Image: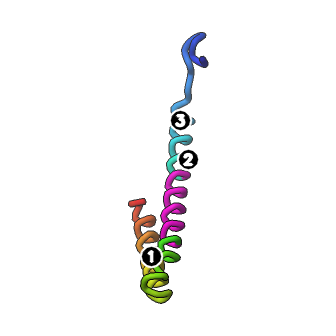
């Protein structure tokens, strides 16, 4: 174990930078997953309502996702 031989010195600035970087990565990943799910839903939806409504659903979903991302909700 790293701290078994004495006190572990961790720079708080380094920890904060790492946490901010990790938050940005997980946010990017979440947005990517939502975008892919919207695309897959469009592919499934076109069988039931046709391409026009499916594409409209996808575009509305992307607009909502973009607005939510800009507001920091995602």
Task: Count residues near mark 1 (Cα–Cα under 10 Å), then give few for <14, some for 14-19, many for 20+.
Answer: few
In the rendered structure, which disc, 3 or 1, sits on the residue that comes first in sequence? 3
The furthest residue to the top: 5
In the rendered structure, which disc, 3 or 2, sits on the residue that comes first in sequence? 3
In the rendered structure, which disc, 1 or 2, sits on the residue that comes first in sequence? 2
Query: Where is residue 11 shown, x and y percent of the image?
Result: 55, 29
For this rendering, which residue is in front, 55 or 21? 55
Query: Where is residue 33 shown, x and y percent of the image?
Result: 52, 61
Q: Are marks 1 and 2 in contact (CB under 8 Å)?
A: no
Q: Is residue 1 magenta?
A: no
The furthest residue to the front: 47
Q: Which residue bears the numbered disc 2? A: 21
Q: Which residue bears the numbered disc 3? A: 15
Q: Is residue 40 above or below residue 5?
A: below
Q: Is residue 70 left or right of residue 5?
A: left
Q: Is residue 29 magenta?
A: yes
Instruction: Tell me which segment is drawn in magenta.
Output: 25-39
Residue at 52% over, 76% down: 43
User: Gap between marks 1 and 2, in whole Å?
Assistant: 25 Å
Secondary structure found at label 1: helix
Query: Where is residue 46 shown, x and y percent of the image?
Result: 48, 82
Q: Is residue 37 above or below residue 10?
A: below
Secondary structure found at label 2: helix
Secondary structure found at label 3: helix
Residue at 43% over, 80% down: 57
């Amino acid at each position: 174990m790293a701290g078994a031989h004495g006190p572990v010195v961790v720079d708080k600035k380094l920890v904060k930078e790492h946490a901010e970087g990790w938050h940005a990565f997980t946010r990017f990943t979440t947005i990517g997953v939502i975008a892919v799910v919207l695309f897959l839903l469009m592919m499934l939806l076109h069988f039931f309502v046709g391409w026009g409504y499916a594409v409209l659903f996808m575009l509305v979903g992307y607009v909502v996702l973009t607005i939510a991302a800009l507001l920091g909700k995602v």
